[in-house]
DNA sequence: TAAAATAAAGACAATTAGGTCCTTAATTTT
DNA sequence: AAAATTAAGGACCTAATTGTCTTTATTTTA
């Protein structure tokens, strides 16, 4: 579904946002520990999130990553997915035809499309904040 | 979503079933041409389908692959997916936690699960015959 | 019986995804 | 100013997936 990089990106963003609520920056080391991900690999995907303006990075002692201001209310999970995996999740043909279209559909198209649209709806309508609150309240988890 | 191997498997099965309706066996060469897939690689996945009892293979002149009797009515797409990709599509955690469960859910779980269940429903409730009819009537396509 | 046609099987190669390491740059603390 | 701390960047490595090739086994046709 999502690539490993994208899974790490979403989990990392949630952790970073939860720290930002406490006005703390999250260091790469902390992030990798809290989401149980490979540090160097996670660093790469965080750079992409940073370049996409989803998170902000600061070098030096007490530096790290943060989600600025109330951005986590307006950042949608779809933006993270788009930054890391692109839009192929919503556009690819389920059976691998070169492109998914109404006028040259594969046999699965009509059945598959609603499911894919459902996925698109949830990622587009769920904000980073929405996912962060469950973590803060202890109802959801980022590792194991 | 599905692996390449699984995409080829579903497309191949649909073509084979459509030929079987005309009481013709489909040769590997024909299959690869009609679904536009790499011949040798497709052969591997057809062997798996054969070992899973979804299709039947016959060697020698006028041999090839077929879907026996009215099996295409009872074979569900889920069986093909299961034979090639296993059950991870329906069981994996969307954010990569070791396992998806209600009592240790990731932040995306509650939103993601309905979508995943939707996918599971369609593959479990769609028979090979269901997908073959659209091809036969010319409404759906297996390549390009 | 010999030849042709077909799938099965296994070794191998190429590509992509996932992951690591090392050096550099920027910032803060001492 | 020097040292420590942090992210950025690039080269590299590893594993999994995808794809190819060659040989063997089985069946039918001539
Ligand atoms: S054409 Fe295959 S999913 Fe749309
Ligand atoms: S725990 Fe992540 S999808 Fe269920």
Image (tube, coloured by chain):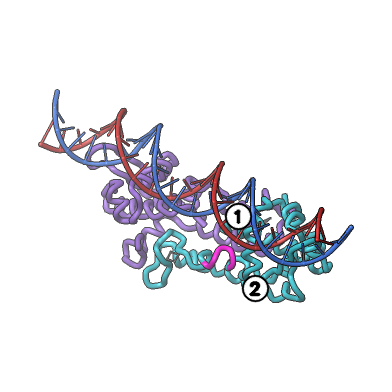
Chain colours: A cyan, B purple, C blue, D red
Q: Is residue B132 above or below residue B52?
A: below
Who's the residue at 67% across and 70% down the image?
A: A54
Q: Is residue A53 left or right of residue B136?
A: right
Query: Looking at mark 2, is its residue's CB closer than 8 Å to ligand 2?
Result: no
- In reply to whether residue A85 is colored magenta, the answer given is yes
Chain at tag 2: A
Q: Is residue B143 above or below residue C10?
A: below
Label 1: state its secondary structure: helix
The dominant secondary structure in magenta is helix
Q: Is residue A19 left or right of residue A119?
A: right
Label 2: state its secondary structure: helix
Who's the residue at 39% across and 51% down the image?
A: B72
> Circle 1 sits on which residue?
A4
Q: Nearer the viewer, residue D4 or B66?
A: D4
Give the label on residue A125, or none: 2
On the image, the x and y values in percent for residue D25 come to 31, 28
Q: Residue B107's quadrant in the figure?
A: bottom right
Question: Residues in magenta?
Answer: A83-87
On the image, the x and y values in percent for residue B63 come to 26, 41
Who's the residue at 29% across and 54% down the image?
A: B33
- Closest to the camera, between mark 1 and mark 2, is 1
Chain at tag 1: A
How far apart are the alpha carbons under marks 1 and 2?
22 Å
Q: Are marks 1 and 2 in contact (CB under 8 Å)?
A: no
Q: Residues within 10 Å of mark 2 (few under 14, many from 20)?
A: some
């Amino acid at each position: 579904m999502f690539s490993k990089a994208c899974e790490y990106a979403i989990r990392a963003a949630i952790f970073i946002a939860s720290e930002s609520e406490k006005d703390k920056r999250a260091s790469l080391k902390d992030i990798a520990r809290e989401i149980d991900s490979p540090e160097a690999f996670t660093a790469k995907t965080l750079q992409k999130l940073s370049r996409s303006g989803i998170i902000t990075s600061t070098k030096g002692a007490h530096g790290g990553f943060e989600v600025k201001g109330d951005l986590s209310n307006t950042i949608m999970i779809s933006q993270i997915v788009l930054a890391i995996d692109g839009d192929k999740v919503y556009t690819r043909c389920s059976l691998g035809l070169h492109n998914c279209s109404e006028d040259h559909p594969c046999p699965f198209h009509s059945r598959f499309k609603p499911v894919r649209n459902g996925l698109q709806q949830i990622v587009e309508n769920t904000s980073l904040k929405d996912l962060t609150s469950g973590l803060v309240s202890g109802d959801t988890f980022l590792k194991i």
